[in-house]
Image (cartoon, helix red, strand yellow):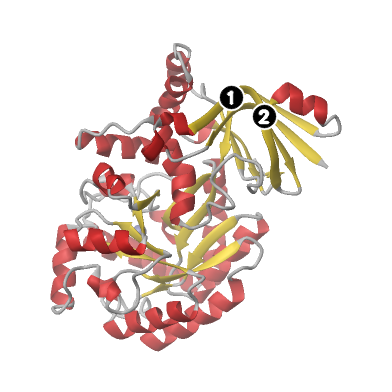
Amino acid sequence: MADLILGQTLGFAADPFAEGPGAARHAARSGVLVEGGVIRAVGDGASLRAANPGATVHDMGTALLSAGFVDAHVHYPQTGIIASWGKRLIDWLNSYTFPEEMRFSDPAHARDIAALYFDIALANGTTSMASYATIHPASVDAFFEEARARGMRAAAGKTCMDRNAPDGLRDTAQSAYDDSKRLLEKWHGVDRLSYVITPRFSPTSTPEQLQALGALWAEHPECLMQTHLSEQMDEIEWVKSLFPNARDYLDTYEAFGLLRTGGMYGHAIHLEPRERARLREVDASLIHCPTSNTFIGSGIFDMAGLMAEGQRIGLATDTGGGSSFSMLRTMAAAYELAQLRHNPLHPAQLWWLATQGSARAMRIDHAVGNLAPGMEADIIAVNLSSTPAIAQRAARAQDIWEALFPTIMMGDDRAISAVWVGGRKVG
Ligand SMILES: [Zn+2]
C-alpha cells in the first residue's frame, strides 16, 4: 500500500556549502511516493498520481515537503529545565542540570520525560536525534523504548561521570564500562536505534573512566561516541588544571582512544589550531549548538572557517542548555551567530545543516536527512505561512528561498503541519 504526499518538495543533490544554493532540488506541485517505509519517488505530483492510482493521497497544498529535521546533540533529561535563568556553564550544571538528572534514578520519571521529549520533538518536526541520557541505565532504556514505540531512528547513550558531580550522579570507571557495554549490546541495531558511547566531558571523567570508554569504543567501532569540547573559556582552564600533561582539551580525549571517525564533539567553539587539524584529519563531527552558545554565553562558533577546512559539521538544539526544541529557531540562531562573523548563511545552507548536515554528522545520511528515492520516509510538511507575520512576508517572495527564510527566522512548531516517521503519519 503506497502513500502519495503532494506539496512543494525540497531536497539536496549536493552540499550547498561546497556547491552553493544550486545544490538544492526544489519543485512546486511535486510529490513524494512512499511505500514500505521508504521513499520510492520524488517528482511531478500529477504524474505520480496518474502512475499510482491506488496510492493514498495526502494533499498538503503548498506546504513544503522535506526530510525531517535531525538534531545531533540533545539532553532529553533536561526537557523539564529548559529556559532556566541566568547561569554560566558550571553553575548551570550545578544549579539546574544535576538536580534534575538525579531524578532519573526513578524509571517512571525517566519514562514520563522521554515520552514528553519525543512528543515535543516530533511536533517540531525533529525525526532523529543523538541524545545524552543520565548516568542511570534506566534513563537509556526509557529513551530507546519510547523511540522504538514511535518507530524512530534515534541514538543515545548512558552519560558517564565519575568525578566533579554530586553524590547520586557518579558512576565509576568500571561501572561506566559495564553498564555502557550492556546497554550497547541490548539496544544497538535494534529496529532503527543506535547506541552512542557517552562520556559527558573530560572534567567529569577520571582518566581511568576515559580509558575504559576508549577501550569499549575500540571493541565497538560501529558505535558513535559523543562528548563536549571547548564550550567556554573557564571550562577550558578547568580541563587544563585537571589534565596538566594534556596538549589541549582535545588531547584529553585523544590520549584515551576517544578521538576518531564516529566521534561527535559538541560545541567546539574555542579550538586551538592543533585541535582543528586533528578533528579534520580523523573526520570527526563538530556539533554546532547556537541557541545554547548564546543562552549560556559561550562564544561564536567559526562556521565559515571550519566549513572551509572541510570539517564535518552538524546542527543541534542542545536541549536544555539550548533554549528551544525547534530546529527552525536553531537555524535562525546559527544565522545570527554567523552574521556576527560577517558570514550570512544562505537558507539552503541552513536547511541542509538541519537535515543532511546533521545526518552526516551522525553517520546516518545513507538513511535519513534527504528527500530522495531510497531514503527512509521521515518526512515533514512545513507551512510557509504559519503566522500572520510570516504569511505577509512570504506573500512577497520571489523564489523559494525568500519564501522559506521568514519561516526559518520566525517559525516554530506551528509551521510543522504534518510529520511522517518511517512512512507512518504521526502528527
Ligand atoms: Zn550538551
Residue found farthest to the right: 54
Q: What label sits on residue 367 in the rendered view?
A: none
- Given residues 286 and 327, the one toward you in this image is 286
Residue corresponding to mark 2: 43
Q: Secondary structure at mark 1?
A: strand
Quadrant containing ligand 1 = bottom left
Of the image marks 1 and 2, the number of the one nearer the N terminus: 1
Tally of numbered tags? 2
Residue corresponding to mark 1: 27
Q: Amino acid at mark 2?
A: Gly
Q: Residue at x 52, y 59 (%)?
A: 113
- Given residues 306 and 88, the one toward you in this image is 306
Q: At which x and y percent is residue 200?
A: 35, 69
In the displayed structure image, the side of residue 155 where residue 174 appears, left or right:
left
Image vertical order of residue 193 relative to residue 210, above or below? above
Q: Residue at x 67, y 58 (%)?
A: 149
